[in-house]
Image (cartoon, grey):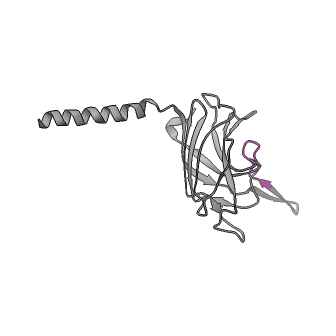
Amino acid sequence: MVRIRAALASLACVLLVSPLIARDDSFLKFDGGIGVIPVSNVAVAGGVTTVTRNIVRGINSPGQIWVIRGLKADVDSDGRIKVQGRGLLLGGGNNIGTNAGQSVLATLICGVNPPVLSTTTTPVALEPNGDFRIDDVLTPVPANPCDSPVLLIRNATGAVWFAAGILKADDKN
């Protein structure tokens, strides 16, 4: 009787877990995030100071530092994207430690020259502590494979980026 119960329990586990594993269409995974520092370089030559903005694949940085405590994202071959972000907050200025009333969307960039952008369609509001969840579909559906993938978390209009995802090492295309 004990063997039958053990066998049934094992079978139940296989039946419950197998469909979850089989349905994983993820072709890109991101684990970890990098907040934006708006300036990438400052040079002084002949008394002239030149400040270079931190532009990623044509997307501008905002005017202030943003920090992010955690980020996980999965992108499926059909364009479905799920992102969970924690602690996306201003890292400087008078509103430091706040979400500045922002809503965000996700943009996956494939390729470098010219880059192809796939963006979620519905911005989500940041919680007061900077947490957010995105469950949407990228438009257009990204290429698979996606060459040199970059995931940016951007403001609701898509004008600037606040954070970037860190591609999992085993998912590099």
Q: Quadrant of the N terminus?
A: top left
- Residue 66 drawn in magenta: no
- What is the number of callouts on the image? 0
Between residue 60 and residue 16, name the one nearer to us.
16
Extreme left residue here?
1
In the rendered structure, the answer to whether residue 28 lies left or right of residue 139 reads left
Along the line of sight, the residue nearer the viewer: 133 or 39: 133
Percent coordinates x, y for residue 114 in the rendering:
76, 33
Q: Residue at x 66, y 59 (%)?
A: 66
Q: Taking 21 as reference, is 62 above or below it? A: below
Q: Please name the residue shown 30% across and 36% down the image.
A: 13
Q: Closer to the camera, 1 or 104?
A: 1
Q: Is residue 59 above or below residue 88?
A: above
Residue bounds of the magenta highlight: 52-60
Q: What's the residue at 73%, 61% (across, down)?
A: 64
Q: Give the quarter of the figure containing the C terminus.
A: top right
In the picture, measured across the screen, residue 127 lies left or right of residue 101, that is left
Residue 55: image location, x then y, percent:
75, 48
- Residue 14's place in the image compared with 152, above or below, is above
Q: Residue at x 72, y 50 (%)?
A: 156
Q: Quadrant of residue 146?
A: top right
Q: Residue 128 location, x and y as percent? A: 61, 63
Residue 10, given in percent of the width and then of the height, sits at 25, 34
Q: Is residue 92 left or right of residue 22?
A: right
| Magenta segment main secondary structure | loop
